[in-house]
Image: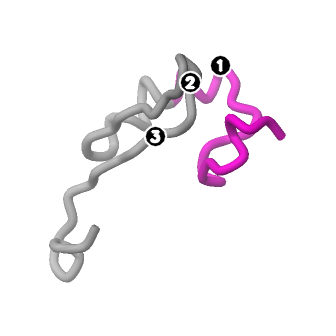
Amino acid sequence: MSITVKYLSSKIPQPYILKDTEWWVRTGSKEIGVVKVIEFEGIFCGVIIANSQADEHVHSA
């Protein structure tokens, strides 16, 4: 496993292939709140997502 993906969430497919990218651009990124890419020296390292919550989760991080 490369150092680039060693600490990523298991929710990110490995290997991450073109089909995964296409799904993310068309569907996945539109289903949730704010999505930002994390990169280091031009290499994808992960994502950070901020979701709006309701009820008892409204003030959790």
Q: From mark 1 to mark 3, how far is it between C-alphas?
A: 17 Å
Badge 3 amino acid: Val
Q: CA distance from mark 2 to mark 1?
A: 5 Å
Q: Of helix, strand and loop, which one carries label 3?
A: strand
What is the CA distance from the residue labelled 2 to the residue labelled 3?
13 Å
Q: Position of residue 23 (x, y in %)?
A: 52, 28
Viewer-closest of 40 and 16: 40
- Helix, strand or loop at label 1? It is helix
- Quarter of the figure with the C terminus: bottom left
What crowding class fits label 2: few (fewer than 14 Cα within 10 Å), some (14-19), or many (20 or more)? few
User: What's the residue at 69%, 40% (across, down)?
Assistant: 5
Q: Earlier in the sequence, mark 1 or mark 3?
A: 1
Image disc number at residue 21: 2
Q: Which residue is mark 1?
A: 18
Image-quadrant location for residue 45? top right
Which residues, given as a range, are shown in magenta? Answer: 1-23
Label 3: few (<14), some or many (≥20) within 10 Å?
A: few
Q: Label 2 sits on what residue type?
A: Thr
Magenta stretch encompasses residue 10: yes
Extreme front residue here? 41
Disc 2 is placed on an element classified as helix
22 on left or right of 35: right
25 w.r.t. 33: above or below: above
Residues at badges 2 and 1 in contact (C-beta under 8 Å)? yes
Residue 23 relative to residue 50: left or right: right
Residue 43 location, quadrant: top right
Q: Residue at x 45, y 34 (%)?
A: 38
**x and y, in percent, of residue 46 in the image:** 52, 39
Residue 13 position within the rendered picture, expressed as x and y whole percent measured from the top left: 68, 41
* Mark 3 lies on residue: 47
